[in-house]
Image (spheres, rainbow, N blue to C red):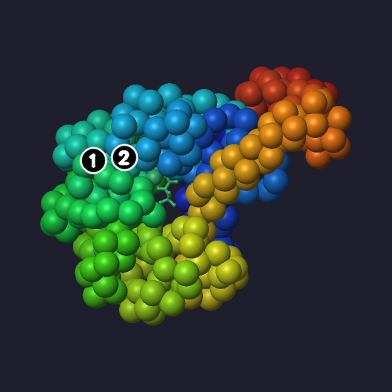
Amino acid sequence: MIGKSAAFRDLLSAPRVVRMVGAHDGLGARVGERAGFEAIWASGFELAASRGVPDSGIINMSDQLAASNLINLAVRVPVIADCDTGYGDEENAAYAVRCFEAAGIAGICIEDNVFPKINSFAPGEHRLEPAERFASKVAAAKAAQQSGSFVVMARVEALIAGLGVHEALLRAHMYADAGADAVVIHSKKSTARELAAVARRWHSRVPLVAIPTTYYRATASDLAALGVKVVIYANHGLRTAVRAMLGTFREILETGSSATVEPRIAEMREVFELQEPAPSQAVAHPHRSGG
Ligand code: SPV
Ligand code: MG
């Protein structure tokens, strides 16, 4: 069996677009895997939200490592952990790589926001690290990995910060030159036009990654046509759950019972199936794999 970082690299070199989905726990990751997503994004936003706190650097490295570890244990597909700003300087990012790699996680993603960051879609000032400084963090992260296959993604927040396509391209190329295995171009526009402007002028073989949270009308095929290799649906599980739970809870209070909501909520047996043994144990008990 190949390691999960090698499996993720195979996805990166496959001649098609790779779709990932966000999760913050083993259950969400299993639902994503069962739906057919090829890899899981251990989302910082989802993890923060699941704890009822903002996505602003409150979740520390140990928290994200523990959550990513549980996610990784729950699924067969590779997991990329959202490590925010890398938790500090070069040394912190390098330590994060050692910890996440040792846990068998396929890779991490670090972004060029200044700590404490705020979520890319949150109102307020988005301050970026100097590009050289962040490139040096990427290089330190890459130097820290033990295996050749561990993946370090670098995320460019220049479009989010309103610094424009030129700055985004400059940074993206610097981070690729520093050794990043993939570069995320994050945008909060309602169309993929801004991303397309970057992708058109991308002169590197390093794969591009998109997170179409706001430009959701762009399909994975549309994005692939622009040259995007990986598409991350970062937070759709949690956003689905929030709306659905609120509706269910209110209806139970309003109607006096759960009778009207039962047809549209998961049956206990469906959840039992998602609580099957972790993949390594499931191999030893194939008759219980649950499909
Ligand atoms: C996350 O999922 O934590 C991300 C992606 O960083 S987003 O929230 O869309 O910026
Ligand atoms: Mg995040």
Q: Where is residue 32 in the image (x, y as percent from the top left)?
A: 63, 42
Q: Name the residue under label 1.
A: 116
In the rendered image, the vertical position of residue 106 relative to residue 162, given as above or below:
above
Residue at which label 2 appears: 56
Rendering coords of residue 13 (x, y %):
50, 59
Instruction: Compare residues 74 and 116 and report the one nearer the observer.
Output: 116
Q: Which quadrant does the N terminus fall into?
A: top right
| Residue kind at label 2, given as amino acid type | Ser
**Looking at the image, do the residues carrying marks 1 and 2 touch, with CB atoms under 8 Å apart?**
yes
Residue under the image location 24 percent in, 75 percent down: 166
Q: Residue at image x 52%, y 70%?
A: 223
Residue at x 31% of width, y 66% of height: 159
Which quarter of the figure has residue 74?
top right
Residue labelled 2 has its Cβ within 8 Å of some atom of ligand 2: no
Where the C terminus falls, by quadrant? top right
In this rendering, is residue 22 above or below 225? above
Q: Which of marks 1 and 2 is nearer the N terminus?
A: 2
Q: Is residue 96 above or below residue 121?
A: above
